[in-house]
Every structure is written in structure tokens, then in C-alpha cells.
Image (spheres, grey):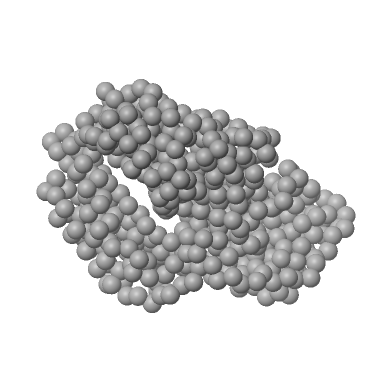
Amino acid sequence: MLKKTAVENILTAALESGADFAEIYAEEAKRSSISMVNGRVESALGGMDYGAGVRLFFGNQAIYGFTNDLTEENLIRIAREGAAAMKGDRIYNIKGWKEMAKRCINPILVQPDSIAKSVKAEHLRRASAAAKEYNSLITQTRAGYLEVMKHVLVANSEGVWGQEDRVRSRFTVEAVASSATEKQSGHLGPGGSEGFELFDRIDVEECAREAGRIAVTMLNAKPCPAGKMPVVIDNGFGGVIFHEACGHGLEATAVARNASVFAGKMGQLIASPLVTAIDDGTIPNGWGSAEMDDEGTPTARNILIQDGILTSYMVDRLNGRRMGAAITGSARRQDYRYAPTSRMTNTFIANGKSDPADIIANTEYGLYAKQMGGGSVDPATGSFNFAVLEGYMIRNGKIAEPVRGATLIGKGYEVLRDIDMVGNNLKRAQGMCGSKSGSIPTDVGQPMIRVSSMTVGGRG
């Protein structure tokens, strides 16, 4: 996108007024999506986007400007305008370029744009039909497909020169079941940093029937009783509670401002000794995986909690300065319009030793949260409120009647502390995470876990 000579001139202009660090991030992105309702295409969209951002550090302060005019002259103007905000004498120069080594973390077998839209739409039609045919109570179906192909360049005055081609594909399906007085839905959304081979890995009709099963089961469910009780949270998207209520508190974005309950607790026991939690941006074809982060640092496998002890935060370059901490390859952004900050990639609780069947059998009474939904979190306190998309009561060590309307209420650090069983069936699921640097793809995950006591909100 940009020649090295142009980048060098832009960064030189950024350093002219005393900035001690300068960075340019440029990208070209091609997106395409298809949305289908009740078996008919509702929209088919596509487009290109490109632009660049220039960031300057003055000690622990940063200035960021962006543009979609990628001419050298305009980018130099952006850099100089940013530098002018902090006047000083130039004392730093650009170091020699060091190109990032390629690791091929996300091999792409079939480029998505090589497949005809009619083929993509046919996958969605099959999913819609399977969901509709699952049960006569299914009154609406939605299916979607998204592909993103992005080329990214990051260069900075420390000599970093990194480029990466990023490809992501995702399939989504939703089924809505209705009665005379109630509607319930089921939803699945598998995806990855992969090409159209996604559809060799997943069965769209099986996904659609599973969405239909959830919707119909919850339509016929009774209201969930409220109170404090043991809660068994299943694998996969159950990891959203750790992601939201704990993971954000381990990002340097919050820690550097002392706006996290985990600030200042490095090396301390913050969770049950059964808990090991990891953020890993190097998982092959993971939804949140990449060769490098959005500052040009190679992604890494960062063990956040080891046997209950806090061992690492997720640290970007600016907040690393503020904290005096090493960067961890965790800087991410939605696109060039956002300055990067520390964010999760693929974050999960690692496998434990318990068999999932034993976890259920050892629970005399409680709630089994098989599928989690959305919720809200206060990162400063870890307080959360999450909906249970699919839930069941556990009675006498067995999964009993389905219940609807359940919510899980608590604080992230309390959940970590009160986990008393961890299964051996780790699974990850895909989602979009919104925060200071925009909306980014992230994996959440865990094996089945049991929390000895949680507040369950219900309708009963």
C-alpha cells in the first residue's frame, strides 16, 4: 500500500516536534455479506474500505489522526498536525526496518471471493429450510454469511515493519419459535480466520436444527426459580462470562488507569486453584487469531491466570509505558479509524480434570446454563448480569426440566473464586467484542464449569 520511502518520510515528519515514538497503520479491506429471512435474500452487500492512521507518543500521552487519503503529502500533513499539538525539539530518529517473520498462523485454503454468491446463498437456503422444518412452532428463520479480506501494514519509528493478509468467514443462523403468547429464539454463529473452507468444517443444516431445538425447548419451558444456588455453565459460549466480567479487567486499558478490580494483584491468588485462563492469538484459524497485533507485535499465547494465580495482563504499547510492563501482542482495533489498545483475542478457561457427566451427577440441586446469551458488565467492579439462552434445573444429580427467563448475577472475581469443578471438554465459540478501539472478532471458551453459589434471577 505504502512504499518504505513514503513511510519513512511520514514518520520523520511525525517526529519533528519532539514525539518520542511514531507509528503508521494502513489497511485495505473488502467485505461482503448476505442476509436471508425465511429463505429469501433480504440483503447482499459488498464494499471496499481503505485508510491510514498516524499515532505519536509524547511520553505517556498519545495523539492519533486518521484519513482515507493515502497520498504521501496528505499523510505527512496529518503527521505534522499531530506533532504540532505537542511542541518540542526533535531528539528521536527512525531505526532501521526489521520485517516481521511470517508464521502462517491462519492458512487459507479457499479464498472467499473465488466462490459465486449463488453458492453462498444456497448454503443459507439449506440452513433456513432445515430450521423451518425442524418443528411447526418455528415461525421465522434468519441466516447470514460474512466474509472480510483485509491487508494491513504497521510501521513505526522503532523499526517495526509488519504486513499481513487477514481473511475471516462466518455463518450465522437463528430460529424463532412462537406460541399464542410467547416467542423464543435459538442462535449459532460459527466462524474463523479461514476462507470458504469454513463450510467443509461445519454442517449448516445441523447448526440450523440446533438453533430450532433451542427455540422450541425454551418456548415450552417453565419460568426459572430465583435465588442463590450452584450453577453449572456449559462449554463454548459459556466462556462469555469470563470474557466480559474478568477478561476486560485484565486488559491494560483498565489496569493502567487503576479501573480494574485486578489492578495491583500480579502474583496473587485471584481465582480457584482449579482455574487456568489463557488469551491466545496464535490458535490456527481462530476467530481472533492473527500473525501480528495492530501495533505490529507478533501475537502470543499469554497465560493470564495459572492455577488461580494472576500471572499476566494483556498489554499494548502505550499502556505498557504507563505501567512499566512488557507488551504482550494484545493491541487491537476495529479499523484505521481507531487507535489500538489492549484487547482479547481468543480467551478461554483451560481444561480441568472433571468429566462433565460427573459435574452434573455431583450437583444435587442447581441451574444448568447450557447456552448463554447477552448481558451487561461494569469493568471497574466486575459486576455482571447475563441472560441464559437455554437453561435447565438440576435435581438429584440429573438434568431435569427446561427453564426460561434465567439471569446470572454476580461479580467476576467472585465467580473465579467460587468455581469448584472444571470439566475436560474445552470448546470455543465466536463473538464480536466492543470496547474503546471498536468492535473486533474474539473467541470465548471454556470447558463445563460449576460455580458453587451464584445469584440466579428468574420469573418465579
Q: Which residue appears at 73% of the width and 47% of the height?
A: 325
Q: In this view, does 428 lie to the left or right of 78?
A: left
Q: In this view, does 87 lie above or below 76?
A: above
Closer to the camera in the image, 232 or 65: 232
Residue 379 visible in the displayed image: no
Q: In this view, does 262 lie to the left or right of 14?
A: left
Q: Which residue appears at 49% of the width and 71% of the height?
A: 107
- Total number of numbered discs in the rendering: 0
Q: In this view, does 218 lie to the left or right of 304?
A: left
Closer to the camera in the image, 268 or 298: 268
Quarter holding the C terminus? top left
Closer to the camera in the image, 236 or 352: 352
Residue 56 horizontal/vertical position (percent): 73, 54
- Please tell me in which quadrant of the rendered image residue 322 appears: top right
Residue 451 visible in the displayed image: yes
Q: Which residue appears at 24% of the width and 29% of the height?
A: 223
Residue 341 horizontal/vertical position (percent): 62, 50
Q: Which residue appears at 27% of the width and 46% of the height?
A: 186
Residue 80 horizontal/vertical position (percent): 75, 59
Residue 251 horizontal/vertical position (percent): 60, 44
Quarter holding the N terminus? bottom right
Q: In this view, does 112 lie above or below 302?
A: below
Closer to the camera in the image, 109 or 425: 425
Q: In this view, does 85 lie to the left or right of 306?
A: right
